[in-house]
Image: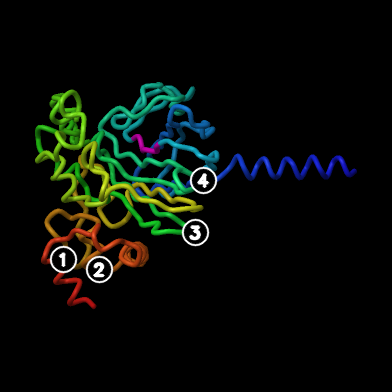
Amino acid sequence: MTQFLLLLLLLLLCTERVLSSTFTIVNECDYTVWPGVLSNAGSDPMGCTGFVLNAGETRTLKAPSGWAGRFWARAGCTFDGSGRGNCTTGDCGSNQIECNGAGATPPATLAEFKLDGDDGKDFYDVSLVDGYNMPVLVVANGGTGVCAATGCAADLNRQCPNELKLAAGDGCRSACEAFGTPKYCCSGEFANPNTCQPSVYSEMFKSACPRSYSYAYDDATSTFTCSGADYTITFCPDSVPSQPSTKAPSPKKKGVFLQDDSWLASLAIGDASPKMMKWRNHFLRQAAPTVITVSFSALLLLRLEN
């Protein structure tokens, strides 16, 4: 009996060491998405590399300690009864619902994480470096530190320049993907932060989504830290219309919106939905003043609101 209890205790301790943060994946789009999961080289695998998530559904995954990798959503997928098929955007090329170690084909909005990094901190971001296919929001829950929310909730498919737009209009490519030049890809002689500078295209992404990575060296305002948190990743957060760009735009919510229809602008001017108010209060309470970038009109409206 004593040996059994000791073995049980060791099992519990091992489990505690192996598992760390919980990721809750939420689909608030009004269509089905197929999230993909890719573990970085050298990181223990998550155990799940792809799954289906219908509109309104949630799924929770437990990450190994020290896990590093990314999440994204595939859209416009067609799979047969045996689970074989492909997707219009974010496809990982596995021809299966599971991605099996393959990453997203650009363009895809990425939620990236490194758990238990330097000083025990988690590092996370939402990246548009590989382009954009749908809105994504990341919220840290229950951690210590700044633990700020981040993401891109603007509909960049509707704002995408023609030269970056996918033929069907359901994705917006990065300038690197569209043109393939070292200047836009931060490669060759541009493979360092001194020579690789923001382009007119990355600045467009940054204007719409100030907290997201817009190009390879966009670290200062795009990487966030937290310790001991669980994370919620929401596709199509309800601060913007949740339809693919090929559908007719939904009517605007009542109130004032900036021209870029960005998530930060909506936060600043007070979207009236209860969920948006919760995210807005969380964002404004925890965000560092040097990170927040809004237009003069948004600041004026925020002042009037208070």
Chain-order first, disc 3 or disc 1: 3
Residue indicated by mark 3: 142
- Residue 42 position, x and y percent, is 48, 28
Q: Secondary structure at mark 1?
A: helix
Nearer to us of marks 2 and 1 is 1
Q: Secondary structure at mark 4?
A: strand
Nearer to us of marks 3 and 2 is 3
The answer for how far apart the CA atoms under marks 2 and 1 are is 10 Å
Q: Amino acid at mark 3?
A: Gly
Q: Amino acid at mark 1?
A: Ala
Q: Which residues are magenta?
A: 70-74
Residue indicated by mark 4: 60
Chain-order first, disc 3 or disc 2: 3
Is residue 273 shown above or below 184? below
- Residue 258 position, x and y percent, is 14, 60
Q: Amino acid at mark 4?
A: Thr
Can residue 286 be found in the magenta stretch? no
Residue indicated by mark 1: 298
Is residue 283 shown above or below 79? below
Contact check, label 3 and label 4, Cβ < 8 Å: no
- Residue 118 position, x and y percent, is 44, 44
Residue at point 64% right, 45% down? 16
Q: Quadrant of the C terminus?
A: bottom left
Query: Around disc 2, counting alpha carbons within 10 Å, would you say few (fewer than 14), some (14 to 19), or many (20 or more)?
Result: some
Residue indicated by mark 2: 270
Can residue 73 be found in the magenta stretch? yes
Query: Around disc 3, counting alpha carbons within 10 Å, would you say few (fewer than 14), some (14 to 19), or many (20 or more)?
Result: few
The answer for how far apart the CA atoms under marks 3 and 1 are is 30 Å
- Residue 196 position, x and y percent, is 16, 34
